[in-house]
Amino acid sequence: MDLSYILNELGEERDQYFNAIAPPIIQTSNFMFPSVAAMRADLPFEYERHFYTRGNNPTVAILRKKLAALEGTEDALVLASGSAAIAAAVLANVQQGDHIVCVQKPYSWTLRLMRDYLPRFGVTTTFVNGTDIANFEAAIRPETRLIYLESPNTFTFELQDIRAVAELAKSRNIVTMIDNSHCTPLFQRPIELGVDIVMHSGSKYLGGHSDAIAGVICGTTAMMKRIFSGEYMTLGAIISPQNAWLLLRGLRTLQLRVQRSDDSARQVVAFLEQHPTVRRIYFPLADSHPQIELARRQMTGCGGLITLSLNTDQVATVDTFADGLKRFLLGVSWGGHESLVFPASIGYDPTTPPADENYNLIRLYVGLEDPAVLIDDLRQSLDAL
Ligand SMILES: *Cc1c(COP(=O)(O)O)cnc(C)c1O
């Protein structure tokens, strides 16, 4: 199935809604039945039929079909946030006494879930340096049920060899899950590499306009049904029809936006690489990335996230650089139209010497603006230091 078909046609039943090009937002909480017999007949099929919007909703259903097709899975579920999606999929695969192997430095709320929350229910996690497959092998125990990946992570961009980890997990009957938010389905295909569950924060590139929070999980129908009848319906962190529609609209331009962000980021990297005030650049497809060969093997693009450090030993200099940017807005998140800067120095006191070097990590997100404008902005702020 070609990408254009998925983004423009798949799942849209236009003859059901006046042949409108844009699908309707079916803003309803529940659905009625013509008879008791019809209601009874539908009862075992809440996963596929329409009872109540906490389960199924026609606007959300279009989105689910497109997302599953994008990742090459049988089905997908869409939740209220990326964090809700992670929690639902992880919880569905563990019970008391089980063990998870998770890559080091995952997304901050993934870390909270596994390090702080799950131990309350007797589920423990070992965090491993994912750059070496031997670390996964060493961490696996008889009670390991889940291996959780995030390749690359979204600050320092360490990668895991996805195919190798998936093979190892399969040989031990362990479920694998990956946070694929960074690459999007356009630049990395984890299912083809053997992963079981693919997760996305829909708040980033999939939505793409900084106006909706959403989360996605993709996998087999069996796995999606298990999550649906468990965490999805029970915890109830579902997406609203309105936000599902915003994601559908975002998807129309997914390829254009992600490609633009990727192209512009490479120009920004080329500029930063030759600037004397820049100490180091972190970018998965830069020649200087320590895992560049693996990156080229399993990623076909990169997207707009770049982290840099400055030639300084002062927290205040990092602050000044970030404050000096006019076109990169100061904020968290990424994946929208607007370029952003997020300095790790916010976690440090600028008046005392920092305890470690991480204050000097400054993450840029390159959005959809003219890259020349963004490079000029970086130049003026760097030159002023
Ligand atoms: C933002 C993000 C999440 C969480 O998604 P929300 O929609 O904010 O809950 C998870 N993983 C990564 C890599 C993210 O960037």
Image: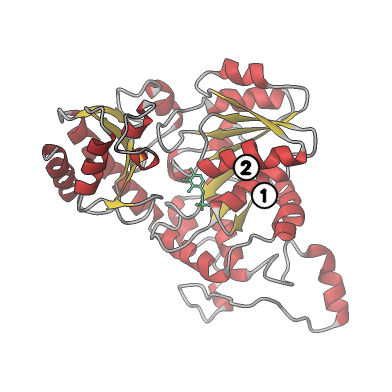
Q: Residue at x 37, y 23 (%)?
A: 292
Residue behind mark 1:
88
Q: Is residue 370 left or right of residue 72?
A: left
Q: Position of residue 273 (x, y in %)?
A: 21, 29
Vertical arrangement, residue 279 with respect to residue 205, above or below: above
> Neighbour class for label 2 at 10 Å: few (<14), some, many (≥20)?
some
Q: Quadrant of the C terminus?
A: top left
Q: Is residue 7 left or right of residue 15?
A: left
**Mark 2 lies within 8 Å of ligand 1 (Cβ measured):** no
| 2 or 1: tag closer to the N-terminus | 1
Q: Residue furthest front?
A: 351
Vertical arrangement, residue 235 with respect to residue 266, above or below: below
Q: Residue at x 42, y 63 (%)?
A: 211
Nearer the viewer's eye, disc 2 or disc 1? Answer: 2
Q: Position of residue 215 (x, y in %)?
A: 55, 53
The mark found on residue 224 in the picture is none
Q: Nearer the viewer, residue 340 or 192?
A: 340
> Neighbour class for label 1 at 10 Å: few (<14), some, many (≥20)?
many
Q: Nearer the viewer, residue 382 or 262?
A: 382
Q: Residue at x 57, y 45 (%)?
A: 199
Instruction: Name the amino acid, label 2.
Output: Leu
Q: Secondary structure at mark 1?
A: helix
Residue behind mark 2:
113
Q: Is residue 269 left or right of residue 196?
A: left
Q: Position of residue 300 (x, y in %)?
A: 40, 35
Q: Is residue 272 left or right of residue 183?
A: left
Instruction: Name the amino acid, label 1.
Output: Ala
Q: Residue furthest bottom?
A: 34
Mark 2–mark 1 distance (CA, rounded to whole Å) = 11 Å
Vertical arrangement, residue 280 with respect to residue 254, above or below: above
